[in-house]
Amino acid sequence: MDKNQATGLLLFAGVLLIYSLFFVSDPESLPQEDPMEQVGQAAPERQPEQIVSEFVEDSLSQLKLQQRFGVFAAAAVGDERTVVLENEDIAVTFSSKGGEIKQVQLKEFKTWEMEPLYLIEEGFTSFSYQLPSKAGPVNLNDLYFNVDESEGSVVFTARTGGGSITRSYTLSESGFELHHDIQVQNLTGELTTQSIQLAWDSQLKRLEEDLEESRRKTYMNYYTSDGSYDYLTTGNSEDEAQVATPLQWVAFKQRFFTAGVIADESFTSGDLSQSTDEANTSLEKKMSASLSLPLQRGSAGLRYYFGPNNYNILRKVAPEFDKNVDMGYFFVSWVNKYVIVNLFHFLEKYFANYGVIIILIVFIIKLFLLPLTYKSYIGMAKMRVIKPEIDELKEKYGEDPAKMQQEQMKLFGQLGVSPISGCLPMVLQMPFLLAMFFFFPNSIELRQESFLWAHDLSTYDTFIKLPFTVPFYGAHVSLFTLLMTISQIAYTHFNNQLTTAQGPMKNIGYIMPVVFMFVLNSFPAALSFYYFVSNMVTFGQQALIKQFVDDDKIREKVEETKLKNANKKKSKFQLKLEEAMKNADAKKKKK
């Protein structure tokens, strides 16, 4: 309907109204009837004035819809109903008004307060798709759709003057992915651009007990079509990004759960932002994403992921989508991805208690690294048996550090002993120790799993609540962290008996456990428990190795090496090293 038609309609309605007011005679009065006889009679007929008034109001309403929605006005009136599409893992609730997602429940999981867990909830999260029509942007949430349900899918259709908009959703029998297709038919001439604008706004509700840790691990991730992964700032600071490069996916990542949207092709651009209301303890963060989805011959497709941050699940969703689980830096992430994750899930098949699984992981890793542990012990034993020779050098050259270092290197070469032989095997074990630092805090498998006094292995175990807060420590005592600290100090004391460490180097081993006690007090109980068990197993391994290693035999081997190297020419490397040390000593003396 154009403006001329609308003007004509109003003039016609005005003529009818004037005619009814001035030319229609009043109806004749009817004889009065007994009130009792009126009961059950039909309502009196509407007066002409009322009919005309309703006609005018309806005409004005239609005019407003026409001006606002253009050709989509026919779909702007209707009745709203809800539809639920579910499988064994999730239940998705839709509204026929907009054909849009209103709620997503993860059936297997609960919040920290043991209530049903809704990753998408009306009033906290909204999806809004807008079409750029000639009448202005049309929000699909303002249109009413007809519903066609079938097993595993639901189709929403909105009819327009000469075309239609169809939104189809498909859900597999299991899993956390929801497929969504949009088709716009016979409306190409009504759109100013061939794209849909998706506005996704969410207030991420608090799902975990440890709010501070949850906020630190809640941030927005995204992946571009050119293979670049990035994220907005972690922590509580505000951040935003305008991405001009086509985007493959965007994810609102919380500590243990992720809501993500993945384009079948790509989003042409995106505006992303996040913020934290630190005063609101019921929310973790606020996030929003505005994405442009191109229409290819009137259709576009995408997928949603609403589910847990499980590495084995996420890596199958989309390229780099497993980045929503923090596996650590490159030099340790490979340990988690290819060793720990697979080992953990293998043990899950046979053991239900996650405390037992952690103990078994420690034993398996320690058994795998036993050759390195043995070599490290032998290296320290060699240093221990040549301690008398080192003490002699200290007495002779103690006042000349450079000369002392030269003579030490010469002694090590003669005796076939390397000062780093005891340290290098320990360094090679470090990736496994550091990998756990990332694995346990991000492992959803440990969420809400209890062990001994720890009610949840994914957060700290509060053995004692303090009436005050200790700086850098907290207002609680984690018993697993305390046990880890004590075991580390005991191991350091035992280890010092096997090494030649003196002075500050000998005492630093007692300082580090105390430092880690402050650092790990608010970390997950599973991490502290793993380190505690690891310390105890290492302590036992070294005590066992000690029973089979004879210092006298090691001394004999050292003497044999000394005789072999007595007339041996120095290697080029040794000569260059000695020359470099002499030059450094000469420069020092000139100064």
Image (cartoon, rainbow, N blue to C red):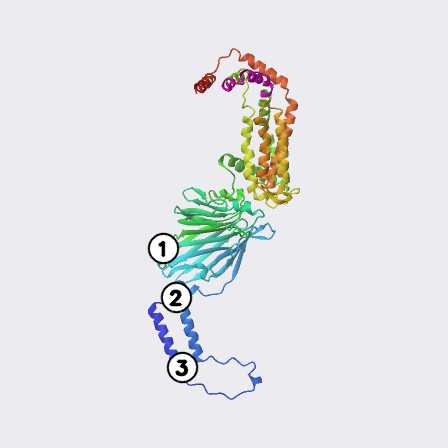
Does the magenta-highlighted stretch encompass residue 399?
Answer: yes
Residue for badge 3: 21
Q: Picture coordinates of residue 374 (x, y %)?
A: 60, 25
Res. 65 image quadrant: bottom left
Depth check: give the residue in front, 324 or 507.
507
Residue for badge 1: 193
* Helix, strand or loop for disc 2: helix
Q: Residue at x 47, y 49 (%)?
A: 274
The residues bearing labels 1 and 3 have C-alpha atoms spaced at a distance of 50 Å
* Residue type, label 2: Gln
**In which quadrant of the rendered image does the C terminus lie?**
top left
* Residue type, label 3: Leu
Residue for badge 2: 66
User: What are the residue bounds of the magenta stretch?
Assistant: 383-405
* Helix, strand or loop for disc 3: helix
Numbered tag placed on residue 566 in the rendering: none
Q: Is residue 4 left or right of residue 198?
A: left
Q: Earlier in the sequence, mark 1 or mark 3?
A: 3
Please, is residue 530 above or below residue 170 in the view?
Answer: above
Depth check: give the residue in front, 43 or 213.
213
Q: Earlier in the sequence, mark 2 or mark 1?
A: 2
Q: Picture coordinates of residue 345 (x, y %)?
A: 58, 40
For the view shown, which residue lies furthest in the front direction? 591
Tag 3: Cα neighbours inside 10 Å, few (<14), some, or many (≥20)? few
**In which quadrant of the rendered image does the N terminus lie?**
bottom left
* Residue type, label 1: Thr
The residues bearing labels 2 and 1 have C-alpha atoms spaced at a distance of 20 Å
Please, is residue 384 above or below residue 123 in the view?
Answer: above
